[in-house]
Structures are given as structure tokens and as C-alpha cells.
Amino acid sequence: MKAIVYEGPSQLAVRDLPRPEPKEGWALVKVLCTGICGTDLHIYQGLHPRAKAPLVMGHEFSGILESDGVPGIAKGSRVTVYPLLSCGRCTPCREGNGHVCNTLGLLGIDCDGSFAEYVQAPVESIVPLADHISDELGAFVEPAAVAVHALRERGYTPGDNAVVFGCGTIGMVIALTLRVFGCQDLLMMETDPARAQMARDMGFEVQDPAKVGNMGDYCRSRTGGDGYDWVFDCAGVQPVADVLLDAVKVKGRILVVASYSKPAAMPFFYGMAKEAEILFTRVYRFKDFALAAQIVGTDPNYEKVITHVLAADEAQKGFDLLTTKGTGAVKVLYRFS
């Protein structure tokens, strides 16, 4: 089978590999479309501590179920896959929090993933796709699940206002899902003109944080002198960390959804003064993932976040698009079938 293989920092190759033989309790999926995640970028840059070359990356994908024996899903069905690998034995798992398992693993890191024509996955992780969900959108369920989990897990209340920093993939799915969840007063912040325009084309107001002046004054001016109920960090960079506590209201909530590649500093006194909450979220529960597989079909804008669909032979181009400034790329997919 054709596969995109990580062979070391900044080294990719398209190789012919044996088709996987599913182990007991796992099923074979023929990959249709698969997306490049921020985690894959960290692996590519040699920054992920668990990912060891040679490795087939990828954990966001749609495909066709090639195995019998999956309860409720017939062989030949189009599916996506909940890609988390939990031990089932540690305290978080026993308490129903397997998504933050003490030894949490992931397809495409701890075993070969979906950057290939075929991938194997646990039987209980297979999720069916509705007929109206395209192959491309099926590969987008995973990032949408991050947003569904963030809002459900941390208790977003419909009607609360929000500001979202970052119009990348996660920022866009947070904004789109906030709209599904009933947010009527939503502002986005983005410095990249192409990404900002994409968000505007989807009906969002977007401001450049470098041009609004004092962030605290600006956010208070937008909210009757209060600041925002919810501040979503979907950027993961120091300049955003500097202003999160300026943007939030007294007793408001900051939710860090971005994965910071470098340690960040924050002016914590401002958080104390406001008795603000700084919250974090990681991946998703299975129910969040299953809900995301339904929610992505409710708004055509989810699919518009997918800016590029490439052939597997264009493996390097996909990563170049996402590591080079000014390309306008947000979500990049490879199509295998």
C-alpha cells in the first residue's frame, strides 16, 4: 500500500508498505481522506517526544470499513475513527476519563496512522458517517470534536459572549461550534489576512489584535465595560497569552484550547484581581466525537475550513503549506481513494 512516512525531522517519503493485518479486537479501514493536524506538524519538526521514525502519521480521517464484526456497522460502510488509545486501567480511565488516560496514546503516534491507504483501529472506536457527510468532511470530524468537547466539558452556556483568538483550524471550529451552541455575540482575533478573510466570509467579525490598541480597553468597549464571558485561546503564542487576562471579564473564563509548543508567561495578578478562571481542555470523549460527526453536517462552513485537498504523492507540499507564512492554508487533507 502507498503510505506517507515520517523518516526524521523535516523528512517525509512516500513508500510502499505492507497492508496492515488487524490484530484481535481491531478492524481494517481503507482510508479515503486524512488531515494534517498540529500534532503532525510537531512530529514533522521533531518536537514530539513519543513519535519515533519511521512512522506513518495521521489520526484525522474518513474511510471504508473493510472488516466484519463491528457491532452495528456493516462492512463497506463509510466511517471515521475515534483515534485515542486509552489503557482502561489507570485512575482516570476507571473514573470515566479515558480521554486523559495516564498513558494516553494516539493513532499516528503510538502506532501507524492514517497517512496510508489502509489503517487498523480498535473495533469500539469505529464511528459511522451519514450519507450527506462528504469524504473530506468525514476527515474533519476529529478537529470538530475538539471544539464540541471544549464547550461541553467546560460548561459553555448559550447566550454567553465570547472572543476567540486565532482563525486557524481550531479557532474556526470553536467559532462555528459556538454558533451552533447559541453564541450570538462573538468576536474573533487574527493577524493573518487570509485567515481573517476566511472567517469574515463565514459571517464572523474579525479584528487584528495588533491594531485594536489596548486589549483591555477594546474588549471593555465592546461589552458594556465588562470584558468577555469566555476567552478562547486557539493560537498558542506568547503575544496572545499576554492579553488573555485583559480580555476576560470579572469572574470570566479563559479556555486554553491551543497546544503551546513553548512555555508561556501570563500576568497572573490580573487573574487574581478579576477572580477569573483559566481552564484547559484536551482532545475529546467518545460522545463528543460522535456528536461532532453529526454537527459538522449542520453548517456548510465546517467544510470551508478545508482549504487544500492533495494527492498522497504531494506529501511534502502539504507540510510546506502549513509551515510557510502567507499561503492561506488552514486545513490540508490528503486523498488516498
Image (cartoon, rainbow, N blue to C red):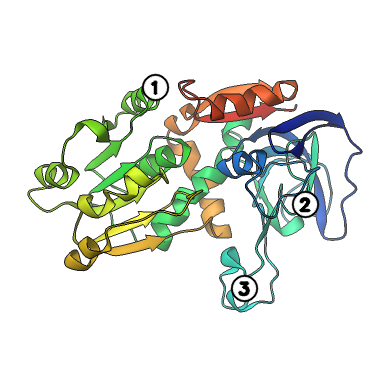
Quadrant that contains the C terminus = top right
Instruction: Name the residue tied to disc 3.
Output: 93
Instruction: Name the residue tied to disc 2.
Output: 111
Compared with residue 105, is residue 194 higher up or lower down, i.e. above or below? above
Compared with residue 315, is residue 224 higher up or lower down, i.e. above or below? below
Instruction: Name the residue tied to disc 1.
Output: 194
User: For this rendering, which residue is in front, 286 or 271?
Assistant: 271
- The residue positioned 27% from the left and 45% from the top of the image is 163
CA–CA distance in space, label 3 to label 2: 20 Å
Q: Amino acid at mark 2?
A: Cys
Asked if marks 3 and 2 touch (Cβ < 8 Å), the reply is no
- In what element is the residue under mark 2? loop
CA–CA distance in space, label 2 to label 1: 35 Å
Q: Dot 1, how many residues are within 10 Å of its Cα: few (below 14), some (14-19), or many (20+)?
A: some
- Can you tell which quarter of the image residue 114 is in? top right
Q: Choose mark 3 or mark 2, whichever is in front.
A: 2
Describe residue 123's horizontal placement relative to residue 41 as left or right.
right
- The residue positioned 60% from the left and 25% from the top of the image is 320
* Number of marks in picture: 3
